[in-house]
Image: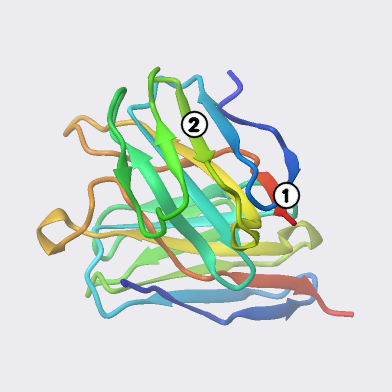
Amino acid sequence: NAGVTQTPKFRVLKTGQSMTLLCAQDMNHEYMYWYRQDPGMGLRLIHYSVGEGTTAKGEVPDGYNVSRLKKQNFLLGLESAAPSQTSVYFCASSGLNLAALPVTQYFGPGTRLTVL
Amino acid sequence: GQQLNQSPQSMFIQEGEDVSMNCTSSSIFNTWLWYKQDPGEGPVLLIALYKAGELTSNGRLTAQFGITRKDSFLNISASIPSDVGIYFCAGQRPLIYGGSQGNLIFGKGTKLSVKP
């Protein structure tokens, strides 16, 4: 049981390049999330998904796209990377309680992205 | 946007000291969570609180969900060197107050360091 995993761990991009970050969870969780973490800013929600085939915008969605084609995977895409997207990206997932409400979130180890 | 005010921003500890930190908001929350993040890692859940007034312990850690539902505190007793790291509070707003189901709002963190 690996929990939440993220690939890659590190990446350096040039401005304008594209890339996809992969998040996978093996806990059969319904909800998945992508956050970015910047110094002094805490964690800010980019996009989230409440189930396979669904996605929704979070607090800072501009410049990012996501897809949830399989329940266990949540992909974060940058179509045209900008230096402002230099950050550490975390994926998280949460299951549902008996009332079908999401419970606590479990985080992956993060991806450190630098855009030059 | 919605904010959680977490304090202090940073603190230095000496082994054996008790530590206290808190989170406050002008808004009501129905869930409070406390996470710890070590360098290069994702946040790890320490304590989850689901009811106003709830007091929960996890080893040397104790957290409380404020009665007004607008605050929470975390105490660490008899600190040890491995307690250093960044501690985040996170809250989930009730749907009827505009919260998005499952989404958390994070404080900016309290950084714990060892006194030189």
Residue at the image point whose x is 54% and y is 70% from the top: A41
B111 sits left or right of A47 in the view:
right
Circle number at residue A75: 2
Q: Residue B50 location in percent, x, y?
A: 28, 52
Q: Quadrant of residue B51?
A: bottom left
Q: Please identify the residue farthest to the front as the structure is shown.
A: A16
Residue situated in front as seen by the camera: B47 or A100:
A100
> Where, quadrant-wise, is the C terminus of chain A in this rendering?
bottom right
Q: Residue A65 location in percent, x, y?
A: 43, 41
Q: Quadrant of residue A31?
A: top left
Dot 2: what SS?
strand
Residue at the image point whose x is 65% and y is 57% from the top: A86
Q: Amino acid under label 2? A: Leu
Q: Residue B81 location in percent, x, y?
A: 80, 62
Q: Earlier in the sequence, mark 1 or mark 2?
A: 1
Which residue position is annotated with label 1? A14
Name the chain letter of the residue that bears numbered label 2: A
Near mark 2 (Cα within 10 A), the count class, few <14, some 14-19 or many ≥20, is: many
Residue at the image point whose x is 60% and y is 80% from the top: B9
> What is the spatial separation of the Cα atoms under label 1 and label 2, in whole angstroms?
20 Å
Dot 1: what SS?
loop
A56 sits left or right of A99 in the view:
right
